[in-house]
């Protein structure tokens, strides 16, 4: 398990992506982006989400840890949505058809955004999937998880963000 981060970096590098262009950590401003959701509706950060606590998570359907984690995250989302939690599942490198099929298969209730060229992932310095950022209402990163997180860990980060 201690080699997992190294393996994730190698897997992402093997996908032909460029090296990350940023080192985004806790306390950094979250990079702005403009994209569409899996249904084609525009999504712009921070404009569309200003003042809202937000989880931005990067994933792909080939990531063996993403499916289970996405289902666990959905449980937290369903409990915390009324408290203002918003989750954006940013797919790194896949098309709308693939993203829609996967989201339908796993049945999660939060939206998926497209990042077909992985430009958003690179702007966030993502080096492995899954990677999750917890962003406060002012657009500042307040938490970061690289790799798989269980439901309890995700919920702790989400609750801290909502305070």
Image (tube, helix red, strand yellow):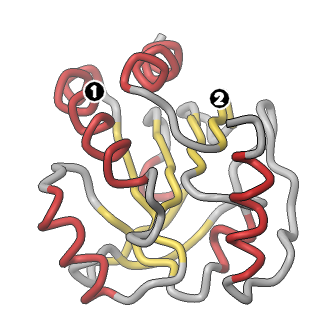
Q: Residue at x 77, y 32 (%)?
A: 26
> In the picture shown, does residue 106 fall above or below 81?
below
Disc 2, SS: strand
Q: Mark 1: give few (<14), some (14-19) or many (20+) Cα within 10 Å.
A: some
> In the picture shown, does residue 117 fall above or below 62?
below
User: Horizontally, is 22 left or right of 13 in the view?
Assistant: right
Mark on residue 134?
Answer: none
Q: Mark 2: give few (<14), some (14-19) or many (20+) Cα within 10 Å.
A: some
Task: Quadrant for residue 105, please give it.
Answer: bottom left
| x and y percentages locating residue 75 in the rendered image | 21, 30
Q: Residue at x 56, y 35 (%)?
A: 134
Give how far apart the Cα atoms at labels 2 and 1 are: 16 Å
Q: Quadrant of the N terminus?
A: top right
Q: Residue at x 86, y 75 (%)?
A: 19
Q: Which residue is mark 1?
A: 76
53 vs 19, nearest the viewer? 19
Q: Residue at x 43, y 14 (%)?
A: 159
Q: Which residue is mark 2?
A: 143
153 vs 7, nearest the viewer? 7
Exactly how many numbered labels are in the figure? 2
- Pick whichever of labels 2 and 1 is earlier in the sequence: 1
| x and y percentages locating residue 139 in the rendered image | 63, 41
Disc 1, SS: helix
> In the picture shown, does residue 141 fall above or below 104?
above
């Amino acid at each position: 398990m201690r080699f997992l981060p190294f393996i994730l970096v190698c897997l992402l590098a093997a996908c032909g992506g460029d090296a990350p262009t940023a080192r985004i950590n806790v306390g950094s401003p979250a990079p702005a982006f403009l994209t569409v959701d899996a249904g084609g509706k525009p999504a712009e950060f921070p404009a569309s989400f200003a003042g809202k606590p937000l989880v931005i998570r990067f994933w792909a359907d080939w990531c063996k840890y993403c499916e289970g984690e996405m289902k666990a995250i959905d449980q937290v989302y369903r409990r915390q949505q009324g408290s203002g939690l918003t989750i954006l599942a940013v797919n790194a490198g896949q098309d709308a058809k693939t993203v829609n099929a996967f989201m339908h298969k796993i049945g999660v209730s939060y939206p998926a955004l497209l990042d077909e060229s992985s430009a958003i992932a690179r702007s966030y310095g993502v080096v492995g999937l899954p990677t999750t950022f917890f962003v406060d209402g002012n657009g500042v990163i307040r938490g970061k998880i690289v790799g798989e997180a269980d439901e309890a860990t995700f919920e702790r980060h989400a609750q801290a963000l909502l305070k």
